[in-house]
Image (cartoon, grey):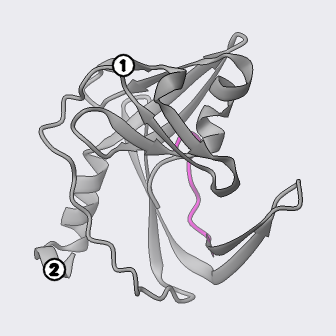
């Protein structure tokens, strides 16, 4: 933010303007999550568990933008890493956004207990912004299959249903 002369609130607003809803319909059920549109031609980053039903059960995914436009996602336009719970999907039509957002990431950033975090999401036409703090900056997660994920952090920010896959 400092390098771009943006306040935290300005940065949060730019990011939240690019949030989308990710919908997956499978076997008569609908799962909803959030994502972040990262390019003008429809690439969205979300969580693997948001689109998991599409992968395993022949479900169909769609991305809905904040202006109400809905774009389908085909399995050919789906990339994910189950172990890190990250996924990228591409909507089949270009998005309504005029340009990608620019986010400066400080790779040397050291998270500390008590640092402020926000969870941003978009669902049912509503933007969500939940505030919390880092409770453990050096968390390790052992998954059910025994796989261990390092370099995580824990937060006490309470996400709302549908924020999953959004930005933290």
Q: What is the x, y in percent for residue 9?
A: 24, 66
For the point 53% across and 76% down, the residue is: 133
Mark 1 and mark 2: Cα distance apart in space:
34 Å
Q: Residue at x 41, y 26 (%)?
A: 63
Task: Name the spot of residue 107 as percent of width and height, x first.
Answer: 39, 80
Question: Taking 45 as reference, is 59 left or right?
Answer: right
Is residue 160 in the magenta section? yes
Q: Which mark is residue 3?
A: 2
* Residue 71's disc number: 1
Q: What secondary structure is marked by label 2?
A: helix
User: Residue 77: where, in percent of width, then height?
Assistant: 46, 28
Q: Residues within 10 Å of mark 2 (few under 14, many from 20)?
A: few
List x then y, in percent, for residue 122: 41, 40
The secondary structure that dominates the magenta segment is: loop
What SS does tag 1 mark?
strand
For this rendering, which residue is in front, 133 or 21? 21
Q: Quadrant of the N terminus?
A: bottom left
Q: Is residue 95 left or right of residue 29?
A: left
Mark number displayed over residue 100: none
Q: Nearer the viewer, residue 8 or 143?
A: 143
């Amino acid at each position: 933010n400092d390098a771009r002369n943006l306040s935290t609130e300005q940065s949060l607003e730019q990011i939240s303007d690019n949030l989308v809803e990710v919908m997956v319909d499978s076997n008569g059920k609908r799962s909803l999550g959030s994502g972040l549109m990262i390019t003008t031609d429809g690439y969205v980053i979300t969580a693997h568990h948001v689109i998991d039903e599409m992968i395993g059960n022949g479900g169909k995914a769609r991305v809905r933008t904040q202006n109400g436009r809905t774009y389908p996602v085909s399995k050919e336009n789906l990339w994910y890493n189950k172990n890190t719970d990250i996924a990228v999907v591409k909507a089949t039509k270009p998005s309504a956004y005029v340009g990608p957002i620019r986010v400066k990431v400080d790779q040397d950033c050291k998270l500390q207990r008590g640092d402020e975090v926000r969870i941003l999401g978009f669902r049912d036409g509503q933007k969500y912004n939940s505030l919390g703090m880092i409770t453990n900056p050096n968390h390790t997660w052992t998954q059910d299959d025994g796989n261990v994920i390092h370099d995580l952090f824990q937060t006490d920010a309470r996400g709302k249903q549908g924020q999953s896959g959004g930005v933290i």
